[in-house]
Amino acid sequence: MSEGASNITALIVAAGRGRRAGGERPKQWQNLAGRSVLDWTLSRFATHPEITHIVLVAHPDDAPDIGALDMPQNARVVQGGATRADSVKQGLQDTPAGLVLIHDVARPAISDSLISGVIAAAHAHGAAAPALEVTDALWQGDDFVRGTRDRNALFRAQTPQTFDRDAILRAHGQFDGTPTDDVEVARAAGIDVKIVAGEERNLKITRPEDFARAAQYLEPEMDIRTGNGFDVHRFGPGDHVMLCGISIPYERGLQGHSDADVGLHAITDAIYGALAEGDIGQHFPPSDPQWKGAESHVFLTHARDMAKARGFAINHVDCTLICEHPKIGPHTMTIREKLAELLNIDVDRISVKATTSERLGFTGRGEGIACLATVTLLKP
Ligand code: MG
């Protein structure tokens, strides 16, 4: 373990077609708390400070989905084989010398501390794997109980099973038959494997009900934020109004320092609000002449990029425009499409509504347009 000893690779085995979990698609592609199982598992290792490389062993049929993933920079994809052991071998060929953590893609809720614990034990003992003690009584039986088994000294095996890469690759080359897991392969080659205390949250998604169990561990880690924005601009001379990035012909225009796009201002403020980053006036002071007449998508894309830089996705936008005229209804689909383009999200995550104020107040008297916006940000 001298050369490349500082490399620590997570080898994620994701080539299986297992359907016991139900659903139309293999379980690694099914939705779990807003992301695919595979995306969760990948991110557990991609964000772990000790992991230097990721090798994802995938099924050739999944190439389009893999291509659509936001793959970490240190990750490479390897095509899997006919069996799990073949897939592991393929992955090991592309794994650099050093430690390799071989992990089931179907265990997406593994904690950072378990990953660290297995790495530390593998450094100390050469090879290590997590397991849980058996606490339930164990029976032998068919329809009836035929006997009991001593549960002492029995363990429920988990992954990541962690080895020196060269040693486990050699062990796979020598192994004859179909192994249960990589620990069996290692032991057949005389490698001792240290047991590390596993964790319940590191469950393997196998049956349909396991998705809900795994989601319980993952959801509390999601950062969900809601921000609101409110803006008003008054009418003045002109022949069109800018609303949410589109120009709507009208007998008057909206007045303001920028293009007075009341819709984009409210949505921009809602994003800043969700980030607790002040408001549009702080980022683009009206006193600064460079923003005079500015097109308001500049403000929106600044807020959007700020959310992205903080790891947030814009999950939903709901925007209500309040005026008597111009009539907004005929333009809502165009507005939604424009916002989808500006925010780089799907149009079905954007709602645009219009209302009058029943001829009451300043909007009712036709003095201006108001806009309310609510934005939901999500950081997995
Ligand atoms: Mg404004």
Image (cartoon, rainbow, N blue to C red):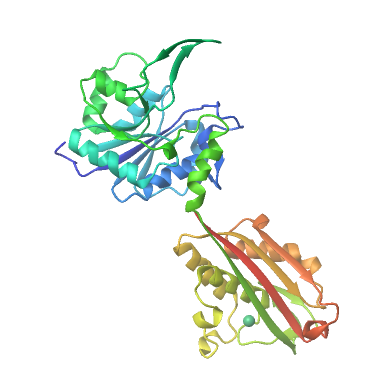
Query: What is the quadrant of residue 57 in the picture?
Result: top left
Return the residue found at the far left.
Answer: 2
Front one among 285 and 112: 112
Question: From where the camera sits, is residue 94 visible?
Answer: no
Q: Quadrant of the N terminus?
A: top left
Return the residue found at the far top.
Answer: 146
- Residue at point 51%, 89% (across, down): 288
343 is higher (above) or lower (below) than 232? above
Return the residue found at the far right.
Answer: 359
Spot occupied by residue 339 in the image (x, y as percentages of width and height) = 64, 65
Front one among 60 and 224: 224
Question: From where the camera sits, is residue 139 visible?
Answer: yes
Spot occupied by residue 134 in the image (x, y as percentages of width and height) = 39, 26
Q: Is residue 229 left or right of residue 357?
A: left
- Residue at point 48%, 62% (across, down): 308
Front one among 89 and 188: 188
Spot occupied by residue 282 in the image (x, y as percentages of width and height) = 51, 82
Spot occupied by residue 197 in the image (x, y as percentages of width and height) = 32, 36
Q: Is residue 358 left or right of residue 155?
A: right
Q: Is residue 246 left or right of residue 70?
A: right
User: What is the total number of numbered labels drawn onto the structure image?
Assistant: 0
Query: What is the quadrant of residue 359 in the picture?
Result: bottom right
- Give the quarter the ligand 1 occupies: bottom right
Query: What is the quadrant of residue 109 in the picture?
Result: top left
- Residue at point 54%, 83% (across, down): 281
